[in-house]
Image: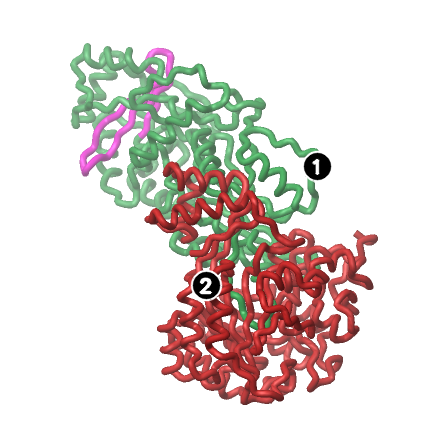
């Protein structure tokens, strides 16, 4: 067990306690640590909503919202620590795996082998990545704290991933505060395990449970459905994008696809390259993604299918937009192409001011694709 | 840092940041592994970040902590108490130049604790590994060599705080206290205006002057504010004033009986109490502290979620008090004075303290039937004064929550 409190003894006051009790200060400490984790994106905004009780024992709550930057944590913690705040909820984004520092990336990938049920899987990856398509990883995670009025305590059996089991059961019995971390079905298992294991190690007085997918396990359900290994990145050495695409198409190595239908779920062959992730860009709202949709609409001007030359031209224009980071750029340049029977991606990446083409292929066919590229004298960037 | 064994638990205290920590079980094992074999983990980094263990630990410190960890297996503590006091309140003088209506202290005789006596007490406290020393009086600033008192405490690694009316604080004296290592100064003020303050206290100008001096310094400070019927509506103004000064905290003290006043006239009504709690809940941007006699406020806000270690009367369980004659008491508000000479013997064996540790079994009246008994226990000093019995329950507590109604 570990607990601590801050304060100096004051004469005449017979031991003074803080109104902000250690449990609430602990939540503040946990939040600060959570936000500081290396997989949390410090460039994204923190969305906060909370309920505040006007009077003691009053049932009247006021709901409030706000948006903060990461360097405004003091303001957020001040709200959290107020005894008038009964529940508190923040949304924050994680960093895309492609943008993680090398050390953190390695640490995340090493977690895969500990995934229950996946012990026998072989991870012979070279340059793995998540799905590049619009239904790729959902990297938003929520941090919610609330008072739990109903207590499922005595017979509570923690399920899923469990850390610090004894602390978990004791805390539930003691009816202390609850912190809930939430994520969407397309969150990455390794990210969830990373967050939970870091919190558990740092805060042994906190019990953690949860994490089962909807199939009751860890690898088969739609929860944590986004895999770190789904695709392999093959970066091509030529900077002549249009010419390279013409060779790939001409030799029958890739067949462009487009998405159709109201929600873009149907994938059909097409003549030219189709910007897969931007199929509904006309409906994007500027305020949601901070001005990016305006920039995109200005460049694309309603066009979605491109010849190789037109595609290269668009890619060059997109590469000059400063507000697009490396993941944005890759995401917007992504076209779906069929390689064999598999839907893969043709996209571009920006590195040190230069633009490179990339194929992101289903992991199982990586070696085959590399061999075919070499056969057609298409060089691969090592 | 000070490390001290309690049964099954290691307690740690850093005087620089005022953090007290309790480590037991797997976490204690984790600390032990770090000290013995250098095994690091996020929990260890957290202890380092909280400055509970040094980043670069000397061999001497390592051995000291390991020895205390070993002692956790054999040390014993009295019922519901720490093995030794966590803190000691010491009144170093009875003299005060003011004449506050609400004062509960006997200032008829001018008694100052000799430095030699004080020094012996501090040496003993150091040997016992007490964490904090809180100095008061009378008016402690009237003690001529006050910086020497502070220096003595600080040299023993304990934290040192002073509670004062502000009377006599100058920039020069504050500099000396700062150089002596004072950790915190608390100034008593009961109103944001002279008029409101004067209902219960004297020396408004002196208090304000001292707060201005403190505000311009690097010494951490706060305001002691006694909640009464004649100033409860002024609480928000005091909060705003404290925030303007950039005070660290406002400590809300419960009004206690004084020989100079009609206690019932200034006691908070239930409406006043609720008004105060509502105002407390709204405060942002400054720490609010609560006198442990006001634990019912914590119960009201947090219900049974409150942890007993951070609530309830601490007299005889967490702290004790020493008067200018060197006599021991559980709390300065109580009349129970002891002639015992040895601090540890008093802590372990005093019948007065034993009574306070058995309150849960011996209390009667409303408190006995309240669901918050174990975390609150009411104010024994008030009950002793009003009903002549420390086991008497509170009367008309606005937070009473009868068990049969839960």
Residue A339: say if magenta. yes
Q: Which quarter of the figure has residue B203?
A: bottom right
Percent x, y for residue A303? 32, 33
Percent x, y for residue A354? 18, 35
Q: Chain of mark 1?
A: A
**Are the residues at dot 2 and dot 1 in contact (C-beta closer than 8 Å)?**
no
Q: Chain of mark 2?
A: B
Residue A78 position (above or below residue B66): below
Q: Mark 1 — residue?
A: A154
Q: Which residues are magenta?
A: A334-362
Which residue occupies 42% across, 41% down?
B42
Residue B258 position (above or below residue B61): below
Q: CA distance from mark 2 to mark 1?
A: 42 Å
Q: Closer to us: mark 2 or mark 1?
A: 2
Q: How is the image coloured?
A: by chain
Which residue occupies 51% across, 63% down?
B125
Q: Indicate left or right for A31 with A310 as reference.
A: right
Hue used for the chain lettered A: green
Hue used for the chain lettered B: red
Q: Indicate left or right for A137 with A371 as reference.
A: right
Q: Which quarter of the figure has residue A159?
A: top right
Choose between A254 and A200: the one closer to the eye. Answer: A200
Residue B222 position (above or below residue A366): below
Q: Is residue A27 visible?
A: no
Mark 1, Cα crowd under 10 Å, few <14 / some 14-19 / many 20+, is few
Secondary structure character of the magenta stretch overall: strand
Choose between A96 and A191: the one closer to the eye. Answer: A191
Q: Return the mark for residue B158.
A: 2
The secondary element bearing badge 1 is classed as loop
Residue B128: say if magenta. no
């Amino acid at each position: 067990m570990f607990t601590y409190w801050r304060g100096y003894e004051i004469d005449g006051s017979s031991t003074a306690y803080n109104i902000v009790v250690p449990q609430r200060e602990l939540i503040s400490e946990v939040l600060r640590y959570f936000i500081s984790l290396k997989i949390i994106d410090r460039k994204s905004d923190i969305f906060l909503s909370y309920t505040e009780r006007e009077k003691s024992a009053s049932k009247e709550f006021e709901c409030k919202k706000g948006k903060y930057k990461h360097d405004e944590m003091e303001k957020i913690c001040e709200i959290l620590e107020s005894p008038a705040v009964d529940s508190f909820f923040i949304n924050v984004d994680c960093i895309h795996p492609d943008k993680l520092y090398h050390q953190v990336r390695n640490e995340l990938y090493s977690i895969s082998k500990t995934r229950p049920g996946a012990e026998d899987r072989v991870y012979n990856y070279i340059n793995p990545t998540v799905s590049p398509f619009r239904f790729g990883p959902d990297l938003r995670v929520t941090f919610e704290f609330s008072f739990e009025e109903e207590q499922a305590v005595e017979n509570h059996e923690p399920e899923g991933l469990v850390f610090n089991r004894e602390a978990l059961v004791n805390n539930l019995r003691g009816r202390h505060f609850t912190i809930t971390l939430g994520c969407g079905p397309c969150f990455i298992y390794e990210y969830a395990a990373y967050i939970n294991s870091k919190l558990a190690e740092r805060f042994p007085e906190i019990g953690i449970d949860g994490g089962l997918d909807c199939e009751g396990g860890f690898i088969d359900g739609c929860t944590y459905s986004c895999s770190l290994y789904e695709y392999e990145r093959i970066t091509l050495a030529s900077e002549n994008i249009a010419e390279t695409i013409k060779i790939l198409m001409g030799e029958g190595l890739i067949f462009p696809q487009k998405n159709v239908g109201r929600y873009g779920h149907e994938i059909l062959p097409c003549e030219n390259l189709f910007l897969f992730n931007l199929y509904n860009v006309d409906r994007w709202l500027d305020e949601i993604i901070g001005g990016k949709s305006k920039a995109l609409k200005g460049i694309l001007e309603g066009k979605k299918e491109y010849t190789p030359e037109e595609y290269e031209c668009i890619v060059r224009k997109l590469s000059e937009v400063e507000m697009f980071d490396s993941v944005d750029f890759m995401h917007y340049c992504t076209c779906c192409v069929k390689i064999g029977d598999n839907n893969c991606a043709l996209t571009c990446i920006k590195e040190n001011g230069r633009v490179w083409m990339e194929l992101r292929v289903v992991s199982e066919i990586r070696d085959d694709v590399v061999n075919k590229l070499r056969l057609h004298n298409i060089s691969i960037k090592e | 840092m000070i490390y001290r064994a309690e049964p099954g638990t290691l307690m740690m205290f850093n005087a620089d940041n005022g953090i007290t920590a309790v480590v037991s079980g797997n976490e204690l094992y984790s600390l032990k592994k770090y000290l013995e074999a250098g095994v690091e983990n996020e929990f260890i980094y957290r202890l380092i970040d909280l400055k509970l263990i040094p980043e670069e630990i000397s061999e001497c410190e390592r051995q000291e902590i390991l020895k205390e960890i070993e002692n956790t297996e054999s040390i014993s503590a009295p019922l519901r108490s720490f093995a030794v006091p966590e803190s000691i309140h010491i009144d170093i003088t009875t003299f005060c130049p003011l004449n506050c209506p609400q004062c509960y202290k006997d200032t008829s005789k001018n008694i100052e604790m000799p430095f030699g006596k004080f020094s012996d007490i501090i040496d003993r406290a150091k040997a016992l590994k007490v964490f904090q020393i809180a100095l008061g009086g009378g008016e402690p600033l009237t003690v001529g060599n006050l910086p020497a008192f502070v220096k003595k405490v600080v040299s023993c690694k304990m934290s040192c705080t002073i509670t004062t009316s502000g009377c006599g604080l100058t920039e020069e004296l504050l500099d000396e206290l700062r150089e002596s290592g004072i950790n915190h100064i608390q100034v008593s003020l009961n109103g944001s205006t002279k008029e409101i303050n004067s209902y219960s206290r004297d020396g408004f100008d002196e208090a304000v002057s001292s707060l201005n001096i403190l505000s311009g310094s690097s010494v951490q400070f706060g305001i002691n504010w006694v909640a009464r019927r004649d100033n409860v509506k002024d609480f928000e103004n005091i909060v705003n004033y404290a925030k303007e000064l950039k005070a660290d905290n406002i400590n809300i003290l419960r009004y206690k009986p004084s020989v100079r006043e009609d206690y019932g006239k200034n006691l908070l009504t239930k409406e006043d109490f609720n008004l105060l709690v509502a105002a407390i809940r709204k405060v942002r941007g400054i720490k609010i502290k609560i006198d442990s006699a006001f634990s019912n406020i914590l119960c009201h806000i947090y219900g049974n979620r409150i942890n007993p270690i951070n609530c309830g009367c601490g007299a005889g369980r967490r702290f004790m008090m020493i008067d200018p004659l060197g006599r021991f008491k559980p709390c300065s508000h109580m009349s129970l004075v002891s002639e015992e000479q040895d601090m540890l013997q008093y802590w372990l064996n005093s019948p007065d303290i034993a009574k306070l540790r058995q309150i849960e079994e011996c209390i009667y009246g409303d408190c006995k039937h309240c669901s918050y008994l174990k975390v609150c226990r009411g104010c024994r000093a008030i009950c002793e004064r009003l009903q002549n019995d420390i086991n008497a329950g509170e009367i008309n507590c606005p937070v009473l929550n009868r068990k049969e109604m839960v």
